[in-house]
Image: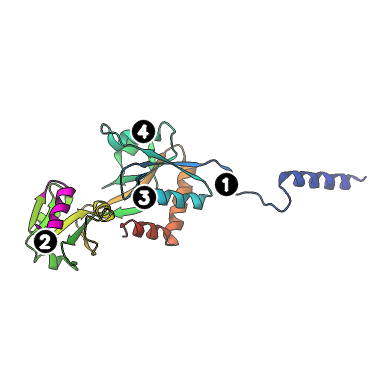
Amino acid sequence: MTTRTRLLGALLAVLAHSHPAGSAPLPAEQTEGPLTVCLADANPPFSASSLPDGGLDAELARAIGRQLGREIRLVWVTIPNRGGLGKALGQQLGGGACSLFAGIPESGGPNEDLTEKNLMASDGYLETGYVLIAAHGSLRSLDEARRLNRIGVVTATPADLYLFQQQLRRVPHGSNEALLAALAEGSVDAAVLWQPALARARLQGKAPTANGIQLPGASRTRFVLALPRKDPALLARVNAALAHLRTDGSLASILQTHGLAP
């Protein structure tokens, strides 16, 4: 047997043992274990274990998993009364219970909890704010709203300040629940609501479904996924997945389904 024949035989043996006949090597992502994603429980429309699909963030996590070729394992987290989201982030991401934590708000700059806990944020997947909706029918412009006598708003919020600056006739309320009740009983002509709160109320059948007006001058908040700063490779892959979902329309479809379309 020549040297050339022996080398060829050795090479064929290696190839035969590397992959079964007719199979192809799996992408690197598919050989990894499940990607664990923490979600805040009882936080619709973003996330709630009681919802059939788990909410917006659960759907987003599964879509990211498909892009990465990874199985997604959801970890439902009860946000503690003391310490709130910041404490939950430290316990779950810092303690290794999950690799990602979805539904993290950022308003006016990076989330301070992420900086303090040596965490980093993905690109934003949602930007939202306040919406003005009518008790009956729909509003098409702020000029129409100026003709209304009673515009309900939750007191001491950016929306309340906006209405004051615009010299609109506002009627302050103590909470979203009280404002929604006033809207339902007709004691206000319209209401300014935080868009996620409005989406949650619509999910429960407690708010009108007519289109509203985004308030351009009120505070805007974007939502990101948080992950440990020590994992820049995962951050790059998650951001690439988000970019693809944004480009092919999947992200817009998820937001639309949960009442948070841009």
First in sequence: mark 3 vs mark 1: 1
Query: In which image quadrant can residue 150 be found?
Result: bottom left
Residue in the picture at 40% in, 57% down: 251
Q: Nearer the viewer, mark 4 or mark 3?
A: 3
Residue nearest the observer in this picture, 150 or 4:
150
Residue 218 left/right relative to 169: right
SS at mark 2?
A: loop
**Residue 243 location in percent, x, y?**
44, 56
Q: Nearer the viewer, mark 2 or mark 1?
A: 2
Residue 14 left/right relative to 123: right
- Residue underneath mark 2: 189
Give the crowd class for mark 1: few <14, some 14-19, many >=20 residues within 10 Å: few
- Residue underneath mark 4: 90
First in sequence: mark 2 vs mark 1: 1
Q: What amino acid is at disc 3? A: Gly
Q: Do tag 4 and tag 1 residues touch (Cβ < 8 Å)?
A: no
Q: Nearer the viewer, mark 2 or mark 4?
A: 2
- Residue underneath mark 1: 30
